[in-house]
Amino acid sequence: MIAHAASRLFRRAAVNLWRAPLPSLVSVLTIGLSLFIGASFVLGLLTARALVTSWGAEANLTLYLDPGATDAQARALAEQIGAQGQGLEVRYVDPATALQRLRGDLGELGPALDGLPENPLPPSLEIIPREPLQAVGLRVLAAQLGQLPFVQDVEYGREWLDKLEALGRGLRAFGAGALLAVVAAALLVVANTIRLAVYARRDEIEIMKLVGATDRYVRAPFLIEGALQGVLGAALAVGGIAAVQHWLLPRASQAFAFAAGVSAMHLVPLHALAILGAGALVGFLGSWIAVARFLKA
Amino acid sequence: MIQLFHVRKEYTGDAPVLDDVTLRIEKGEFVWLTGPSGAGKSTLLRLLFCAEQPTSGQIIVGGHNVGRLPQAAVPYLRRNIGVVFQDFKLLDNRTVLENVGYALEVLGASDADIRDRARKRLSQVGLSHKAASLPRSLSGGEQQRVAIARALVNEPTILLADEPTGNLDPSLTESTLQLLFDANARGTTVIVATHDRGLLQRWHRRTVGLSAGKLVFDA
């Protein structure tokens, strides 16, 4: 009996979609557009976060040593740090090399350094993590290295890192809020669109109830229809995003130069599945809300 | 079978549509429910199939107090009540056979069972040859016969008809009513609301009169 009812409900849902193509099309397009906007937004957000993370990951450390430390002591320290097994590449920069670099950096003003009575620059060690480090890891490493002998100061762009972290937190908060708003708006629009379709079939609902259909039985074909419309809309959204990524994004990437080596997030099969699932869910919930309002009325 | 005790129905701010109606209808009876427009006939029928709740009083249908029936139990009560309306209430996008079988679908019957029983009912109302037609291609009389076939397809114990001949030519009235008499002869309790005194004079049955919401005679 249940199998009869279930197969009939699915058949009915498919037939209803076919028999009322215009309301179905409007629902499918609405869901498709909402998901397209939502998914594009999420992908954009993921790209932005990846970009911020990559900026953080590029950070290096510089250890400024005691000016009294000898060449041999500095090199020994460099070897000690390199041998700690933390995946760090260590380069020793002696004061003469540091001065030479500064002269180069100053360009035309470089010769002004010639008047200095002695080289004021301390020896230093440049620490480059072989694997990208997150901000927290960088802070811990800086604190550890600061404890080593001869190390007077550790420079790792703390302020820059703070700003990046704040930006990351802001993006997460904004992303969560905005995504919630997009989903809520989509659900509302979809529910109202489906409500129109349900309203167009109020006679059918009235007759169903008249002949003894339970609310669950009345609701079921609408929910199945909603889920089917959701999946169709989601397929449109996936197609739209794939098209945008294929045709538009390469040009946009060139224009905006994601120079940090981070390319825009691409739609992978898992994303596509998630969008299809979201479509089914939005269609299902939208129908539920629409029919619930109608059954109450 | 059907009992009403001091039933009152009113909508906020308006005079009561039904006022202190007490009535008992036995199983297998045929009852005309009559009175002028606005007398409360349709409201009384709507109370019987739980489309509305009484403001006060008690209604017992088949042993169930409909006022105390949980909302979830209403569909199961309705499966024992067939309803026929003046405007037929058929689904235009379904064939005649599908319309008749609709009442069986909600019971979870198999496709074959639905087809067989719907065909049998269509045959009883003389419309076997219209099984594949859409309702809008049928005459008013034929549509009403389809509606009656749908109301009777799951063999309800009660049949309620609200002005079933109101939209029909006099020539079609007799054949339509005959279907209701036939159902009654098979044991179904039938209540027909009508304001057409000609029907009451031609077919003598128990007649309950309503006027301005009050029961004014029962003969």
Image: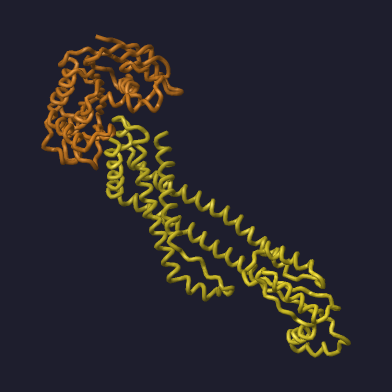
Chain colours: A yellow, B orange
User: Which residue occupies 58% across, 63% down?
Assistant: A49
Task: Name which residue lies at 16% across and 31% down.
Answer: B141
Q: Is residue B53 left or right of residue B96?
A: right
Classify residue B35 as left or right of residue B186.
right
| Residue B198 visible somewhere in the drawing | no
Count of residue discs: 0
Indicate the position of residue A25 as horizontal and vertical percent values.
Answer: 34, 53
Tell which of A16 and A138 is nearer to you: A138
For the C terminus of chain B, give its image quadrant: top left
Q: Is residue B43 left or right of residue A105?
A: left
Q: Residue furthest right?
A: A117
- Location of residue A111 (image quadrant): bottom right
**Rendered position, A164 above or below B138:** below
Residue B89 locus on image (x, y percent) = 26, 33
Position of A230 relative to A163 (above/below): above
- Residue B12's quadrant in the figure? top left
With respect to residue B131, does A45 lie above or below?
below
Foreground pick, A244 / A56 = A56
Residue A249 in view of the camera: yes
Where B137 falls versus B46 (above or below)?
below
Q: Quadrant of the N terminus of chain B?
A: top left
Image x and y of residue A262, in percent:
55, 70
Choose top left, top right, bottom left or bottom right for residue A209. top left
> Of residues A183 and B87, which is closer to you in this image?
A183
